[in-house]
């Protein structure tokens, strides 16, 4: 009886400590949770609501007031915007452009080239590697307008275009790069910026690998490729998952460089889904900016992003990455 009576206060204290620990954790998470709620979750709900309306910016304030103060259902159109979107003759082309743009830029530059740069600069003189990475990151901290003006000068027609000036010197015909090679330059101008982000993450992860592991592989007589394949890459699963997921979502939603370079042209040749949503919701490209129709495009983009993020977590075995270690260190 005495032991049971003495254990009761201990159980109460342990429960109180667990409750305080949970409250402390929630307190630390509260600022980030508030930001996610205000700037991500609530806007997502607004986009979902707008996608089933026929609101337009030409009479947006009036329509919202009438919809809020009356029971007139004419502003709620249900799935009409989605039916109209999938019936759009340009929708399949834009969807194909989006996946091509994301995959090409991601594999060639944002992950592929970033990993190559990180591996190279992490195995050279430390100062030289730092200088190279600092130079590579310059496009990311440059104004998008200035960055795109540089690319436009490179591909412009003669006598202003740098590439066409070289073509003249070599006796080759002038090339309309904006039309004939649009995708090449769209992928390149986005990729050189995207590679800088992954380069920083991968370099930090590589430099954090314990030197003992690398020395042990050298003692075992491993080649450079074997060290990369069996030592470095397995330890980069977390950075690879983060960079791949983040850059995929970034490419799905970013369109400013395409907008500034050629606005998705010519004839929607390089128009992606996010740019299409912008043109229909906020631009006067279609005579009037249609909030509801553009929001339907945005909803589809959110669904694609969630599906791809889920696939990435399965491919990289996210559950194993966050699992507790099987061996406890005392």
Image (cartoon, rainbow, N blue to C red):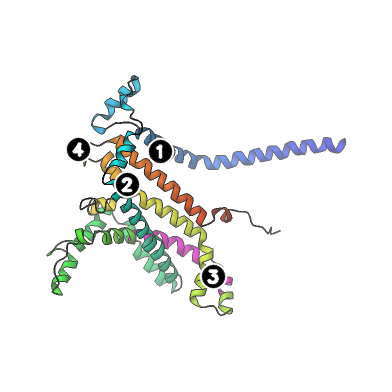
Label 3's element?
helix
Q: Nearer the viewer, residue 79 or 318?
A: 79
- Residue receiving disc 1: 44
Report the number of discs.
4
Residue that numbered label 2 is attached to: 274
Q: Which mark is residue 324?
A: none
Q: Earlier along the polypeptide chain: callout 2 or callout 4?
A: 2
| Mark sitting earlier along the chain (2/1) | 1
Reply yes or no: does residue 213 show up in magenta.
yes
Give the magenta part as a residue range: 192-214
Q: Earlier in the sequence, mark 3 or mark 4?
A: 3
Helix, strand or loop for the magenta stretch, by majority: helix
Is residue 243 found left or right of 26 in the rendered image?
Answer: left
Classify the position of the C terminus by image quarter: bottom right
Q: Which numbered disc flags the more N-terminal residue, 1 or 4?
A: 1
Which residue is identified by label 3?
230
Q: Which residue is mark 4?
A: 287
Is residue 204 placed above or below 253 in the rendered structure? below
Element assignment for label 4? loop
Q: Residues within 10 Å of mark 4 (few under 14, many from 20)?
A: few
- Neighbourhood count class around disc 2 (C-alpha, 10 Å): few under 14, some 14–19, many 20 upward: many
Tell me residue 181's x, y (percent): 23, 62
- Quarter holding residue 185: bottom left
In 3D space, how far apart are the residues under numbered discs 2 and 1 (Cα atoms)?
15 Å
Q: Residues within 10 Å of mark 1 (few under 14, many from 20)?
A: some
Tell me if residue 69 comes above or below residue 45 in the rendering.
above
**Separation of residues labelled 3 and 2 (CA atoms):** 39 Å
Q: Depth-wise, is mark 1 or mark 4 nearer the camera?
A: 4
In the current view of this chain or complex, which residue is farthest to the right?
A: 1
Horizontal side of 149 relative to 326 (left or right) equals left
Q: Residue at x 40, y 59 (%)?
A: 197
């Amino acid at each position: 009886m005495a032991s049971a009576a003495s254990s009761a206060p201990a159980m109460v204290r342990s429960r109180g400590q667990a409750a305080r620990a949970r409250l402390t954790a929630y307190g630390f998470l509260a600022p980030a949770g508030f930001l996610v709620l205000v700037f991500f979750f609530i806007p997502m709900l607004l986009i979902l609501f707008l996608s089933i309306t026929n609101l337009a910016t030409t009479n947006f304030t009036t329509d919202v007031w009438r919809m809020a103060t009356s029971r007139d259902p004419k502003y709620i159109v249900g799935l009409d915007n989605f039916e109209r979107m999938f019936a759009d003759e340009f929708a399949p082309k834009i969807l194909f452009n989006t996946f091509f743009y994301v995959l090409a830029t991601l594999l060639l530059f944002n992950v592929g080239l970033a990993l190559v740069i990180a591996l190279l600069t992490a195995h050279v003189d430390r100062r030289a590697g730092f200088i190279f990475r600092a130079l590579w990151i310059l496009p990311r901290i440059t104004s998008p307008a200035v960055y795109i003006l540089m690319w436009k000068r490179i591909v412009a027609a003669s006598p202003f275009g740098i590439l066409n000036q070289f073509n003249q010197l070599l006796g080759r015909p002038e090339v309309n790069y904006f039309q004939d090679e649009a995708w090449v330059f769209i992928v390149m101008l986005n990729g050189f910026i995207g590679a800088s982000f992954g380069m920083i993450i991968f370099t930090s992860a590589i430099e954090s690998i314990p030197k003992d592991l690398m020395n042990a592989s050298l003692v075992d007589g491993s080649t450079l490729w074997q060290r990369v394949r069996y030592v470095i890459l397995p330890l980069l699963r977390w950075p690879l998952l983060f960079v791949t997921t983040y850059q995929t979502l970034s490419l799905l939603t970013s369109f400013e460089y395409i907008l500034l370079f050629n606005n998705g042209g010519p004839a929607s040749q390089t128009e992606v889904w996010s740019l299409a949503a912008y043109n229909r919701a906020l631009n006067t490209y279609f005579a009037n900016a249609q909030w509801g129709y553009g929001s339907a495009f945005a909803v589809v983009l959110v669904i694609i992003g969630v599906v791809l993020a889920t696939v990435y977590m399965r491919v990289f075995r996210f559950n194993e990455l966050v699992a507790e270690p099987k061996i406890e260190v005392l």
